[in-house]
Image (cartoon, helix red, strand yellow):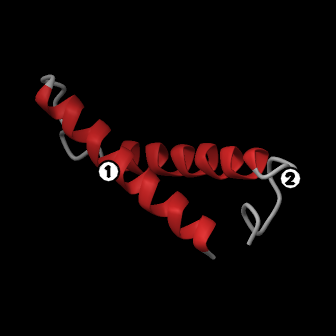
Amino acid sequence: MRSLQGVIIFTAIEIVTLVAWLILAGVPFNGGFVAVAVLAVGLFLEHAVSVNVGAGKPPFSWPLGND
């Protein structure tokens, strides 16, 4: 369970940072909630795969890491 919590926290921090960075860079948000959702899913999958590979497990196995 700790690996899942870590992936969720890391993903949330990265989403907030990337969205804020794009807004500050002048990219109009215009209600791009679907774009943020796609970013969230993609980053979550990327982080989950990296946790599994780092733990020596197959990339898309469940549960994550050594939990």
Q: CA distance from mark 2 to mark 1?
A: 33 Å
Question: What secondary structure is marked by label 1?
Answer: helix
Question: Residue at (85%, 49%) from the top-left corner?
Answer: 56
Q: Are marks 2 and 1 in contact (CB under 8 Å)?
A: no
Front of the two marks 2 and 1: 2
The C terminus, quarter of image:
bottom right
Q: Residues within 10 Å of mark 2 (few under 14, many from 20)?
A: some
Given the image, on which type of amino acid does mark 2 rest?
Lys
- Residue 28: percent from the left, percent from the top? 16, 31
Given the image, on which type of amino acid does mark 1 rest?
Phe
Is residue 52 or residue 32 the one in the foreground?
52
Image quadrant of residue 64?
A: bottom right
Left or right of 27? Residue 47 is: right
Is residue 13 or residue 45 the one in the foreground?
13
Q: Where is mark 1, residue-wise?
A: 33
- Residue 22: percent from the left, percent from the top? 23, 30
- Residue 5: percent from the left, percent from the top? 52, 69
Is residue 28 or residue 12 the one in the foreground?
12
Image quadrant of residue 61?
A: bottom right
Question: What secondary structure is marked by label 2?
Answer: loop
The N terminus, quarter of image:
bottom right
Question: Residue at (46%, 50%) from the top-left corner?
Answer: 40
> Can you tell which mark lies on residue 57?
2
Which tag, 2 or 1, sits closer to the chain's start? 1
- Residue 49: percent from the left, percent from the top? 70, 47
Which residue is most to the bottom?
A: 1
Question: Residue at (45%, 43%) from the top-left corner?
Answer: 39
Left or right of 56? Residue 17 is: left
Is residue 28 or residue 40 the one in the foreground?
40
